[in-house]
Amino acid sequence: MNESRINNRWPVAREGLPFITLGCGLAVLFYFLGVLSLAILTGIFGLFSIFFFRDPDRKTPVPDKAVLSPADGTIIRISNIEDKGNPLGEPACKISIFMSIFSVHVNRSPIGGTVKTISYNKGKFVSANLDKASDKNERNSITLETSGSRKIVFVQIAGLVARRIVCWLSEGDRVQPGQRIGLIRFGSRLDVYLPRDSKVTASLRQKVTAGKTILGYL
């Protein structure tokens, strides 16, 4: 577990510092060189990087057995999967959350428990709002097991522009609900797989906030 990232006290995720430094540094350089057009463009990039990599601190009381949204964004799909050929390995309810480039991109744990497995798969980079992104795109699957031996899986999925999935967890780590677990750069998607008997309270097209919005209950 990367404690420095998970317990970040900076207003931005540290993965964004190279982009912020580059944009702002070039803006200053071009300004003093008198190239104002480039100074404005690189300054805008630097400011957008600060906005994109923002990492607000969030602490919310979590009701018993509640499953929190692992990402900021919009729910674009809620579906029941009867076969066992999904990451959960049993009939499941799949909730897909699309993160635009304007969303906070730091991901958070939907429940408290133990990280049982982490599985990374290379893949393509089709648009993250398409359902085939779940199977075709680069993705990182994390399986969590609660103290009551219930399991859920959430999957970080790269998108058309996103080309870097970051996970700060290791197998065997204990996590708390709403705890930071990683991020995806520049637009992406997260899929959550709940046991089929879970009570889903989220709705299609709902705007959700990582670590705060309740998707349902185990």
Image (cartoon, helix red, strand yellow):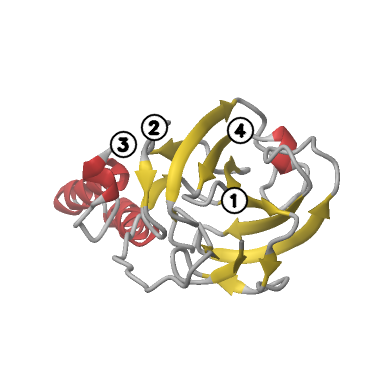
Quarter occupied by the C terminus: bottom right
Tell me the CA gap for discs 3 and 1: 20 Å
Q: Residue at horizontal 55%, vertical 46%?
A: 149
Rendered view: 202 above or below 160: below
Q: Position of residue 62 (x, y in %)?
A: 43, 70
- Against 148, residue 104 (above or below) is below
Residue 111 in percent (x, y) is at 48, 56
Amino acid at the residue labelled 2: Ser
- Residue type at mark 1 is Leu
- In the visual, does 88 lie left or right of 15? right
Mark 3 or mark 4: which comes first in sequence?
3
Q: Which residue lies furthest to the right in this view?
A: 82
First along the sequence among labels 2 and 1: 2
Residue at the disc numbered 4:
138
Q: Is mark 4 on a helix, strand or loop?
A: loop
In the rendered image, the residue lying farthest to the front is 148
Q: Which numbered circle lies on residue 170? A: 2
Q: How crowded is mark 2: few (under 14 residues within 10 Å), some or many (20 or more)?
A: some
Q: Is mark 1 on a helix, strand or loop?
A: strand
Identify which residue is drawn at 38% across, 37% down. Answer: 169
- Circles 4 and 1: CB atoms closer than 8 Å: no
* Front in this rendered view, residue 210 or 174: 174
Q: Residues within 10 Å of mark 3 (few under 14, many from 20)?
A: some
Sequence-wise, the earlier of marks 3 and 2 is 3
Which of the numbered marks, if any, corresponds to residue 190? 1
